[in-house]
Image: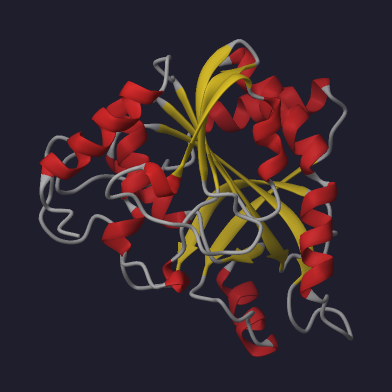
Amino acid sequence: MNWDNMEIYLEIASFVRNRINITPQIGIILGTSLGALADEITNPVSIPYTEIPGFLQSTAPSHAGLMISGALAGNNVICMSGRFHYYEGYSFADLALPIRLFKLLGVETVIITNISGAINTTFEPGDLMLISDHLNLMGAAPTRGINLDEFGPRFFDISKAYTPKLRELAYQSAKKLSLQLKEGVYAYVLGPHFETPAEIRALRILGADAVGMSTVPEVLTATHCGLDVLGISVISNMASGILPEDAPLSQVEEVGSSSVEKLSKLIKAIISDI
């Protein structure tokens, strides 16, 4: 797909706008095993990705492949239950599509979630980590190529990509709910394989607290589009080499699923005060 053509984005946005009955202010992207949060949306309108002309298709396990609009905690939202990853074979230009669609639909704030492995040894599986910054180790970005001025400027600052006021709001909401909320730097890697113990040691030296295979392309695109961004990682396992034995994939998915309830409570509390 030639994503340098603005008309493609406008056509996709027109299709979705004609199917939903709201103007969403908040966009949510759900990571692996976190799809149950979408069940909290009231008066939902669900659109399978397969029905959206020109849209990408989610191939990762535990990703429903649904775009769901409706109300959550008193605000109009649109939620992607199932995201796209570079390891699925998509280009970085492809990965810009969901956030740019959100922008065209009227979204002003995006909440991006993922499950990730802990590098910080004070973290434990099941913890929630507020993302304060990231390491993009992929050597590429979704805004590479021809710039579409309708979305944002050619050069843009990402020093505050994770919006400070939203991070403060997240802390206040967690305190009200008596939820412990960690904070740290998220390292973005290729996947789909997990990292080697040597790679994890290197990431720790670089300052990473958690590692995963998503989120950063969406954050970069949202920042380019001038959207406020909140990123939350669910810690599903300790990264390679930290424990004598690595967690099996089934355990990673189970921890993600079991953490949905507290993640949902936190996100609803945040949205209610936005």
Q: From the viewer's side, name the closer residue of 182 and 257.
A: 257
Q: In the displayed structure, does residue 40 sit left or right of residue 257?
A: left
Where residue 44 appears, x then y in whole percent? 58, 22
Left/right placement of residue 178 relative to residue 62 reads right
> Colour mode?
secondary structure
Q: Look at the image and tell me whether residue 190 can be seen.
A: yes
Task: Please provide percent x and percent y for residue 79.
Answer: 52, 34
89 w.r.t. 125: above or below: below
User: Looking at the picture, how far across and down is residue 181, in whole percent?
Assistant: 77, 40
Quarter of the picture holding the C terminus: top right
The residue lying at 34 percent from left, 30 percent from top is: 16
Residue sitting nearer the eye, 114 or 131: 114
Classify 206 as above or below 75. below
Left or right side of 152 for 111:
right
Name the quadrant containing residue 187: bottom right
Q: In which quarter of the image is the N terminus?
A: bottom left
